[in-house]
Image (spheres, rainbow, N blue to C red):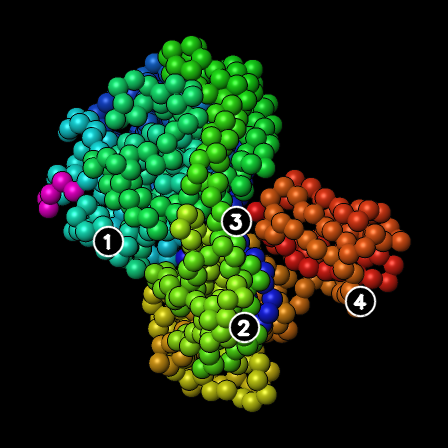
Amino acid sequence: MMRKSIILLVALFFFVKLTGQAQSFYDIETIQTIEIIFDESDWDGLLDNLASAGEERLLGSVSINGQVFDSVGVRYKGNSSYNSSNAKNPFNIKLDYVIDQKYEDFGTIKLSNGYKDPSFVREVLGYEIARNYMPAPLSNYAKVYVNGEYIGLYTSNQDVDKYFMRTHFIDDENGRFKGEINESKGPTGGVWQYLGADSTDYATKFVIESDSGWPDFIDFLYILNYDNTEVYQKLNIDRHLWFLAFSNLLVNLDGPINNPQNHYLFQDMSYRFNPIPWDLNECFGVFSMVQTATEPMSPQDLEELDPYLNIDEADFPVVSKILSIDKYKKMYVAHMKTIIEENFSNGWYESKAFELQDIISTDYQNDNNTFYTYSEMADNVNNSIGNMGPPPNQMVPGITELMDSRIEYLMGLADFSSQAPNIQNSVISPENPSTGESVNFTAEFAYADEAYLAYRYDDYSMFIKLEMFDDGAHNDGASGDGVYGVTLNPEAMLINYYFYAENTDAAAFLPVRAEYEFFTLEILGDIVINEFMASNQITATDQDGEDDDWIELYNSSDEEIDISGYYLSDKSNQIDKWEFPDISISAGGYLIVWADGDTLQSGLHANFKLSAGGESVVLSAPDKSIINLCTYASQETDISYGRYPNGTGEFCSMTPTFSAENMLSSDIPEINTDLSVQLYPNPARDYIDLVFGETPNNPIEIRIFSIVGSLVYQSEVNDQQARISLNGLKSGMYVVYAKSGDLQYRTKFIKE
């Protein structure tokens, strides 16, 4: 499961962002080239005929950035965005329609034509915001050619398929449902109603995309509608609150806060359903019809859309059965305020919209099949486009025109302006807990009536909330001093946790993106997963000269340790995949296991391979308790993923140190003396700020390195504060180094 977490090792807090490390096919700064070849010259008419008949596809070959795929199935997709008279219709391209083939890890390519979005950024911008708070598709742009003819520029959106599920939820076999209106089978109606025990009763609103799952899905809908106090066992409540907050804030009315369509629901390993956003081309106020109203909403109505839309509507249990619970309502407001503060109040979304338009500017102007002119595209970021082009006779609001007014409206409401709890100065004691040792958690909570520690022992279980106290009896200092404490006796080597507080009017989280982001306390034993490589071509070979994936274990103790009967796996829900034979690791020693799935070879060869697209590596004791777990995102070929510092630190991409001590690249300077510097934000998007403890007497040399030692930035400053642009840097981990005279500073940060 890809996750967003904040790692705590010893007393070191450090953000590690795993979700959102984009595959190159969805690199936002690269416009992909997709060329479709059909044998038939009348391919457009054939696709039109297939679209009217159903889901069949036309066979052809497809080239993606020069890589050719044969026997590919292609069809038109879309509802209102598809029209047989369009010169540019949306495509669904299934690479693995006949042959098991993929581009990178993607078997299905989904391309949108921008029919209802003059700005041509709504989907890409919307998904980028969503991915900070929930699993959501990757999205960028592609140029599409058919039989040598340039059809135009498209938005390319990641399919919500099994690979997506493995990436975000570890498992891909549970129930997966798509909200999809089938008006030929009945009216639209409400959202997430219980319609009966027969799965055919749901044919107008849902399509199952998994092999099974109807009984659990129907049971979830029944509990939601008739016993909502227990719905937390069937629905990932916090994930749903983020989903509702995002949908309402971005005025995405062509989705489940108003319509049954354009979302997915997936049942995770804790047997709870998780909503996933889909089809954001009409977010930011393009769709203006509320089901419970008789007329489309005016621009002012959209700006002042009720943040609790449908809270009193029985036909919309998707909202009413959740936000009617006061605690959930306060959490929902806290989440919406976080989205506002991180994306809108600071103007980030406007800058990002123009950045996206800059990326596509040339190719948009070269597209003769756009639905809007280039000037209309550029203008729609700030201004309304109306009474022209599709959708006919409808005004499409400017994104900032809508959202600036909307933010002002929302933040003027009592629920949004109320004093929320303030959580800070969290401390863990002891700093380096050993196996079986109790752990004390404390934090300062201002304006709080209740305070909680939420924790779990893996990446997929439900968080358990443990009340914290300010009574002087829970290692919290003096009674009534605002410091709350609680003691936990860990039952595993890994603890995910966050802090939550509320008062009569409002709620707060630390970290603010919880539960999607959380702190992690890793209680390291003597044996750890120290380094691994999921895409090995030239780094190391096994005893037969094969370039296999490999996993390195390290014994940090001063004694030899027998690991006979331990387990290694690539699945945290199947931790006993491969059992170690009779073997030990020497004191301070390393042990390599080849993850090649070939157990017939001599030596240590596990019965699984590592996915370069991302999964988990799990080490477990003979009693099947997890000792060590690393969940990772997509990996580069011949770049390893290892702990730094060796044996104890966070995992990061690095130059491989096969069966040896992990070290940063020798190109990154070591430091011997301290220069006082604060770096923020971390993770960062567009820039980092460096604030120096005092105005330096000497110029400060600043260098930024990739984690493998490539110098990507260098400058000198003479001021107490420096803002460094990160434009042009790919997502990932970097090292910043600063030097003033004899004083030096070095730290790592994440570029989102």
Labels 3 and 1: the sequence-earlier one? 3
Disc 4 crowd rating (10 Å Cα; few below 14, some 14-19, many 20+) is few
- In the image, is residue 70 part of the stretch drawn in magenta? no
Q: Say which residue label 4 marks.
A: 673
In the image, residue 200 lies at what x, y percent? 12, 40
Mark 3 belongs to which amino acid?
A: Gln
Q: Nearer the viewer, residue 164 or 267?
A: 267
Q: Image point 73% across, 63% down: which residue? A: 666
Q: Nearer the viewer, residue 396 or 649?
A: 396
Q: Nearer the viewer, mark 2 or mark 3?
A: 2
Q: Say which residue label 2 marks.
A: 477
Disc 3 crowd rating (10 Å Cα; few below 14, some 14-19, many 20+) is many
Q: Quadrant of residue 247?
A: top left
> Could you tell me which secondary element the residue under label 2 belongs to?
loop
Labels 2 and 1: the sequence-earlier one? 1
- Write down the region rendered in magenta: 194-198
Labels 4 and 1: the sequence-earlier one? 1
In the image, residue 589 lies at what x, y percent? 58, 81
In space, the residues marked 4 and 1 are separated at their CA atoms by 57 Å
Mark 2 belongs to which amino acid?
A: Gly
Decide if residue 497 is in sight here: yes
Q: Confirm or deny contact between disc 4 and disc 3 (CB under 8 A).
A: no
Vertical relation: 8 (above or below) 126: below
In space, the residues marked 2 and 1 are separated at their CA atoms by 36 Å
In space, the residues marked 2 and 3 are separated at their CA atoms by 41 Å
* Outermost front residue: 480
Q: Say which residue label 1 marks.
A: 229
Disc 2 crowd rating (10 Å Cα; few below 14, some 14-19, many 20+) is some
In space, the residues marked 4 and 2 are separated at their CA atoms by 34 Å
Q: Say which residue label 3 marks.
A: 21
In space, the residues marked 4 and 3 are separated at their CA atoms by 33 Å
